[in-house]
Amino acid sequence: MTQAMKVPSSTEVSKKLLTTADWQKVIQDYLDPPKPWNLTVGLFIGGYLLAALSIWQWYQGTWPLPVLVGLAFLALHMEGTVIHDACHKAAHPNKWINQAMGHGAAILLGFSFPVFTRVHLQHHSHVNDPKNDPDHIVSTFGPVWLIAPRFFYHEYFFFERKLWRRFELMQWGIERGLFICIVFAGIKYNFMNVIYNLWFGPALMVGVTLGIFFDYLPHRPFLSRNRWKNARVYPSRLMNWLIMGQNYHLVHHLWPSIPWFEYKPAYEATKPLLDLKGSPQRMGIFESRKDGFNFLYDVLVGVRSHKKKRSKMRPLAKILPNSRLRRKWINLLHRTAVIPSSKHI
């Protein structure tokens, strides 16, 4: 896709602030539906081909297990981007093909497309809201290296909030039933070793990858609910391909209908606007002592309080052997508390 108009430099913008209508013209070309044959379609087909190749090689080939696991991981990693774009109707211009791609990616990932879609859209509506953002719980309720199992919270959130629409509960039942049937067939016909090595194991690895690069890194330190600051950008051509644009996550939050392969050019087109808005455009892990401390805490513990005086972790101080350790524990809870600011600040 080509840009609709020449993008002004930061200096030009500082001299004359563009109007909302001007910026809409800048970004409009990226908001158009993708072409029928696009990179997301390639990811969808490529993911299934790699999955089939890994299974075929398991039975017929001589490739070592690490290579097969790597192929399976790559297949699921690719489908993670497909299901994400499909839930925003950005995978294909035809709504039925878009839906088919979303359900197909979900089946390979062991997900449910209705659950992923409704829960993810709740995340977009309530970014960094401790009560209503399901991904906030995933990111702040345990150590980063255990982030994958916390995705099961999405299923609970889906039913607890009654998020389904029309036929989505039936779709959930079909996809979950298919998952159970595959596992039972694996037990009955003795191919659980394939399921463990080429599905469950790679899915766990992909869960960690998605958790870190879709949830944790883009939204830390989880404090702002302002639409220009509730996620971040950390520009990198290499990361753009490795994690398929999620290093430009703020662009996705601002304009969710942009497909992943347009994040980078859309960011470059709107960078002057993001500069003016004060949007975070760095990874923000080791830029200060506080950043480094909080990142280390998330790796090792990761449970964040949302009320300094009434932390759910505070009662643990009672089991510590002396008052000095109890004070240190309470001080740690205060230092790592996450209390998001107002949505409009």
Image (spheres, rainbow, N blue to C red):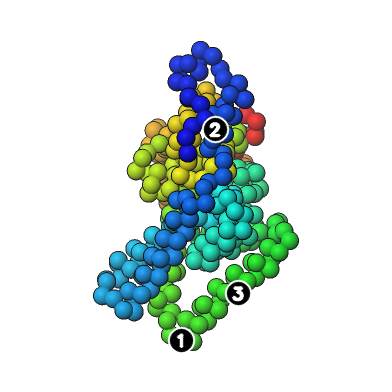
Q: What residue is rendered at 50% in x and 18% in y?
A: 13
Mark 3 or mark 1, which is nearer the start of the sequence?
Answer: 3
- Nearest the eye: 332 or 55: 55
**Whole-percent x, y for residue 313 in the image:** 56, 51
Q: Residue furthest bottom?
A: 188
Mark 3 Cα-neighbour bin, 10 Å: few <14, some 14–19, many ≥20: few
Q: What residue is rendered at 47% in x and 39% in y?
A: 1
Q: What residue is rendered at 61% in x and 47% in y?
A: 123
> Which numbered dot is residue 27?
2
Q: Residue furthest top?
A: 15
**Whole-percent x, y for residue 138 in the image:** 54, 53
Q: Which residue is mark 1?
A: 189
Which kind of residue does numbered mark 2 sit on? Answer: Ile
Mark 2 Cα-neighbour bin, 10 Å: few <14, some 14–19, many ≥20: many
Report the Cα–Cα distance between label 2 and label 1: 53 Å
Which kind of residue does numbered mark 3 sit on? Answer: Gly
| Vertical side of 229 occupied by 54: above or below | below
